Amino acid sequence: MYDVIIIGAGIVGCSTAYWLSQYEMSIAVLETHNDVANGTTKANTGCMHAGYDPQPGSLMAKYNVEGSAMGKQLCEKLAVPYENCGSLVVAHTKEDMKTIEELYQRGKQNGVKELYLLDEKQTRELQPRLSGNVKGSLYAKTGAIVDPWQFAIALAEVAVENGVALKLNNEVKAITKKEGIFTITTNKDKYQCRYIINAAGVYSDVVHEMIGEKEFTIIPVRGQYFLLDKNEGEKVQLMLFQSPSQKGKGVAVCPTVHGNMIVGPDAETVESEDLATTAEALKYIKEQSKLTMDCINYRDNIRNFAGIRARSDRGDFIIEESKSVKNFYNLAGIASPGLTAGCAIGYHVIDWLNTKENFVKKQNYQETRRKIRFKELSFAEKNELIAKNPAYGRIVCRCEHVTEGEILDCFSSPIPPQSIDAVKRRTNAGMGRCQSGFCGERVAMILKEKLNIEFNEILLDKEGSKILMNKAKEGDY
C-alpha cells in the first residue's frame, strides 16, 4: 500500500511526484500511456508565461507567476533546455493599445516583474520583422521558453531516483474506498493508498466521478501548430502574441529552445482527445500569423501537430480537495498557462497533505539530474568523451547532431524509452528537418537491441503504433 498515488504523468503529475519524493512517504504514479509527458504536455508552444494574462486573484495568476519565478533554477538543476527570451504582446490598433495597457495593469497586480509598455520604435528594435502598422507592445522580460517534454521527463526521472514507483500502461478503470483506504483498479493491477492526487488532464473529471459526485466538467480544446525549420527560427527573437480580442488570444509566433519557429495554436472544442490536424485550421493559423509576421516561409514547415488543452467549466484551475471524497485532491483544468504553473502546483501539494499528518523531509535526497548533450560540448570535451566511449563519436541524427552515446544513455536512465518517439523526446533525435528520415532506422535497431524485442514489436509512440507488421519475404531482417 502507498501513502499517495498520483493519477497522470503530465507536467502536473510529474511535478507533484518530484516535490513529494523529497518527503518520507511511499508514492506511486499511474499513467495510461507507455511514457510520461505523452498527453497535453508534449504538444504545446513550450512557453513559460510571465503571468500578465490571468485575472488577478485567480489560481491561474497565483501559480503562473510563482511557476515562472521557479522555472529557470529548476531547469538548471534538471539539465533541461530553457531560454529567457522574453515575450511581446503586439498592438496594431488603438483598441489593441488599450488592451495591452489593461494587461500591463493586470500583470502588475499579479506581481509580474520587469513588465514594460513599449512604443513602435522600441518594439521594432526588439523584433525587427514584425508586419503591419505596429502601435506598440507589452514586453515581459521574464517570459521564457522550455522543452516541455524534457521538463516533465526530468521531473519524473528524479522522482523515480528518489523512490517513486512509476506504473506505465496503467489506465485507471475504477476507484473505491473502504475504511479510509482507496483501491484503484487499472487495466493491469490493483493499487491501494491513503491519498489520491488526480492529475489526469483531459480525463480528470472522469477519474473524479469514479468515486465522487460531479463537481466540474473538463472541456477538451484542440490547438494545431506548424513547426518550421531552423532557418525560419532565426527570424523570431521573442515569443510574439497578438492582442487578445473577443475572437480570442490570437495565434502565437515563437522560437523554440532548439532553434525552430513554432506557430499556433487555434482553439477548437472537440468531443474527445482528437489529435487530428485539419486543412481548415492550418489555413486559419497561416492567415492569422500574417498579422504578426508576414515573412514566414511555410514551405520550410517540417511538421504539423495538435495538442489538447483541458479547460474546465469554471474558467480557472481546479486545485482543491474533493467536496464529496475526503483525501482525494483534484489538480484539474490545468490549461494554459499550465506548463508554467505546473511546477508551482506540484510544490504546494505537500502543504495540503501536511494539514492531515506530518510528513518529514528525507535526509538524503537527489534533487538534480545530469544530461549529456554532445553538440553543446567544447571541442576538447567532445574528444575526451569519445576517448572514454566511442559511441559518442557516432552521429545518429545528422539534423540535430545526436550521437549514439546519447541515445544509449536513455536506456540506463530511471525511465528508459519504449518507442522511437520516446527516444526523440529524450534526445531530440528525429526532431530535425528530415523528421527521422535518416536516423529512424538506426534508432529502431537500437530499440530492438536494448529492449530485446523483434522489429515488428517496435512502436513509433503509444501502444498499438507498430512501425512494421509483417515480413515482406522470408529471411533475416
Image (cartoon, rainbow, N blue to C red):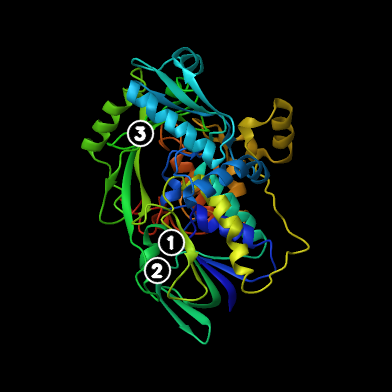
| Amino acid type at image mark 3 | Pro
Q: Residue furthest bottom?
A: 179
Mark 1 vs mark 3, CA separation in Å:
29 Å
Residue mark closest to the camera, 1 vs 3? 3
Question: Is any part of residue 146 visible from this angle?
Answer: no
In the image, residue 282 sits, relative to residue 26, either above or below, namely: above
In the image, residue 225 sits, relative to residue 39, either above or below, namely: above
| Amino acid type at image mark 1 | Ala
| Amino acid type at image mark 2 | Val
- Residue 312 placement (x, y as % from top left): 36, 56
At mark 2, the secondary structure is: helix
At mark 3, the secondary structure is: loop
- Residue, x 56% and y 46% (percent of image)? 151
At mark 1, the secondary structure is: loop
Return the mark for residue 244. 3
Q: Is 2 on the left or on the right of 387, as rendered?
A: left
- Residue 288 placement (x, y as % from top left): 29, 28
Quadrant of the image for the N terminus?
Answer: bottom right
Q: Earlier in the sequence, mark 1 or mark 2?
A: 1
Return the mark for residue 200. 1
Question: Foreground residue, 473 or 191?
Answer: 191
Q: Is 476 on the left or on the right of 84, as rendered?
A: left
Question: Is any part of residue 137 visible from this angle?
Answer: yes
- Residue 49 placement (x, y as % from top left): 50, 38
Q: Earlier in the sequence, mark 2 or mark 3?
A: 2
Label 2 sits on residue: 207
